[in-house]
Structure formats: C-alpha cells, structure tokens
Image (cartoon, rainbow, N blue to C red):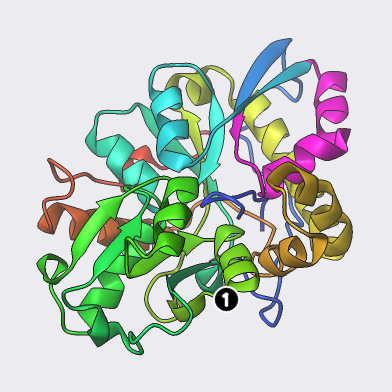
C-alpha cells in the first residue's frame, strides 16, 4: 500500500463496515534523482463535504505537517467531482479526489490531468434508491421509469452496469441530471422514480425518508475513489505531491481506527446526525496506493463503456494519464 487516504463523493467517500479496511503502510517511491525535501510551495486542494478530505481538513494536522515541510495548503469546496475537475482543468486547483467517472468525462473534454492514486473499491458506498412503497422491486422494473443522477459522477457507471445486468438499454429509461440536493428534492416530490447516488446522501435518504436500496454497486462497479492532479503540477512538483500523499495516508490510517471521531467532525458540515454519518463512513475504506495496471484496465472499461454509449465525444486512453513517479508520463 502506498500513502494516501481517501476522501469522498463520490467523492465522501470505500469499503463497508463488514469489508476489510486497507491502510497505507509504505511511502510512495521516488526516483533517485529527486530531492528529499520540497521547496516552498502552495498546494491547492479541492474537497467535498462528507469525505475523507473533509475529516483531514477538519483535524488540521495535515496542514501543520505539510507546513513544516514548506508546503502551504489552500482549500476549495465543490459539490461533486465533475465541478472539481472543471476547476482543475482551468488551473484553479492542483489536486482533488473524485469517483471513477468524473476523470473519464474530464479527459474526454481535454483536461490535462493525471491519476495519482486510488483508494480501495467501495461498491456499497453508492446505490440506486427508490421511494418507500415503490412498485419497483428489481432492476428490470426500471424500464420506462424516470431516473435522476449527477451526470458524470461515479454513480453514472453504476446505472449503466445495472441496466446491462437487467437486460435493459440506456434508452429504456428517462434520465434526468441534477446535483444531489436538487435530485433529492425531485425524488421526494415523486418527480422521478429512482435516484442513483453515493454516500453520505444515500444513507441519509434511507434514514430520513425511508428510501429503499434497490441495489448497490456490488458485482456491478468497483467504485474507486481517485486522487487526480493537474499534470503540470505533478511534473513540476513530484516531491511535494509525494509528501502530500504520504500525509494523506497517515490521516487515512487515523480515520480507519477512529470512524466515530471522523463522523463527529463531518456531521456538522453536512447537517446529518453522527449516526447517519458513521454509517456512511463505514461504507468506505481508507489507504490509497499508486494506480496499478489492474485498476487502470478497470478504469479503461468505464471509459470504453461511456464512449460506446456516446456519453463522451471521443475515445480516451487511461494508461497514458496514470502518474508513475520517476517516469515521464
């Protein structure tokens, strides 16, 4: 394992309470040519409420550790991964953590990004919800129904895979694209029949409105969270990036063993009870590592699926935008 930690949805954002949690234990490798210390640098990080980075930001130890290494951290909040990567593409932030789908859409739009690490798969941290009392009991029952989700978010691939499993086409449903808050309002008003969403929003809807989990991503999608960096930043400051990921990894280890404390930090940010927040955090794992060839190929399958459905305008290749410290991407 390497050095990072996770955030999240996606980007809260990893494994369930019953699944093994993976914690980083080894530092990220650097080439021999790189110096052990970073020069004074400002690192601009994008974050979402309710994820690991929200905990890290709230605790404050991360910033103190990096400051001692000459790295000043600034934070920018985003409602979801697509908006975060738009900001990264125009140079407003240097690093963020998002689900599987946003970087595919961003790369197709020409974003100059690099996948620098991923956290463990978290299939139970995203779900397809239906209202309490709904006549939708199986995925096949979605045919002809109205489904809402955040376009380009991690759950977009979950919907694609769920329809495929049910023998349905994407055209067999009516899809609306709304951010989480607006989607929940539409869902609770009955304007849509199903909502595809990630935690903590999924856990909140189940606890507060009686929403029913039609399916999660188990067997359908891995639901990785990826740390995405601006390519120019990664190339100009590889040591800074490595040190940052090392510190995120340490924080991830703390979150893994202090889920109750982590939930207490985040609950006020998102306006949820500590119990609901704790449930959502239990659906994620913490301890990211460099992106392996296996994960790269899984991500390529997502990119290919979206291209085949004409949801992205061109085919993209994931491998060339995976960060490999010490090598030229």
Quick one: label 1, few (<14), some, or many (20+) residues within 10 Å?
Answer: some
Is 266 or 293 nearer to us in this picture?
Answer: 266
Q: Position of residue 61 (x, y in %)?
A: 88, 35
Q: Is residue 122 magenta?
A: no
Q: Position of residue 179 (x, y in %)?
A: 42, 45
Residue identified by numbered label 1: 210
| Kind of element beneath mark 1 | loop
Q: On the picture, is 271 further left or further right than 304?
A: right
Question: Residue 136: x and y, percent?
Answer: 33, 84
Residue 52 covered by magenta stretch: yes
Whether residue 297 can be seen here? no
Taken as a whole, is the magenta stretch helix, strand or loop?
A: helix
Task: Indicate the quadrant where residue 190 lies.
Answer: bottom left
Residue 282 locus on image (x, y percent): 71, 69
144 vs 125, left or right, is: left
Q: In this figure, what is the number of numbered marks?
A: 1
**Residue at x 76% of width, y 21% of height:** 37
Where is 110 relative to 58, above or below?
A: above
Kindly identify the residue that appears in the image at 60 percent across and 55 percent down. Answer: 13
In the displayed structure, 61 sits above or below 25; it is above
Q: In the drawing, does residue 144 fall left or right of residue 218?
A: left
**Residue projecting furthest to the top:** 40
> In the image, is residue 11 above or below residue 222?
above
Region rendered in magenta: 46-70
Q: Examine the rendering and report whether any part of residue 80 can be seen.
A: yes
């Amino acid at each position: 394992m390497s050095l990072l930690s996770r955030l999240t949805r996606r980007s809260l954002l990893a494994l369930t309470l019953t699944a093994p949690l993976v914690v980083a234990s080894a530092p990220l490798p650097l080439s021999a040519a790189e110096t052990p210390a970073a020069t004074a640098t400002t690192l601009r990080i994008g974050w979402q409420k309710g994820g690991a980075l929200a905990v890290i930001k709230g605790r404050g130890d991360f910033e103190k550790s990096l400051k001692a290494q000459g790295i000043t951290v600034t934070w920018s909040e985003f409602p979801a991964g697509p908006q975060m990567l738009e900001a990264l593409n125009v140079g407003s932030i240097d690093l963020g953590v998002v689900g599987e789908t946003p970087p595919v859409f961003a790369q197709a739009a020409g974003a100059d990004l690099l996948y620098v690490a991923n956290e463990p798969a978290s299939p139970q941290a995203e779900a397809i919800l239906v209202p309490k009392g709904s006549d939708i009991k199986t995925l096949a029952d979605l045919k002809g129904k109205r489904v809402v989700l955040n376009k380009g978010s991690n759950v977009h691939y979950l919907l694609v895979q769920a329809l495929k499993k049910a023998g349905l086409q994407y055209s067999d449903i009516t899809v609306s694209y709304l951010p989480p808050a607006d989607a929940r309002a539409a869902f609770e008003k009955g304007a849509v029949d199903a909502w595809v969403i990630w935690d903590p929003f999924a856990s909140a809807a189940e606890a507060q409105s009686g929403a029913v989990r039609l399916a999660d991503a188990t067997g359908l999608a891995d639901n990785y969270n990826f740390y995405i960096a601006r390519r120019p930043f990664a190339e100009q400051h590889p040591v800074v990036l490595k040190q940052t990921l090392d510190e995120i990894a340490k924080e991830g280890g703390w979150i893994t063993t202090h889920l109750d404390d982590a939930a207490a930090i985040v609950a006020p940010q998102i306006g949820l009870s500590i119990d609901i927040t704790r449930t959502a955090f239990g659906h994620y794992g913490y301890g990211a590592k460099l992106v392996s060839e296996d994960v790269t190929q899984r991500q390529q399958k997502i990119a290919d699926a979206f291209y085949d459905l004409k949801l992205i305008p061109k085919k993209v290749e994931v491998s060339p935008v995976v960060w490999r410290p010490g090598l030229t991407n």
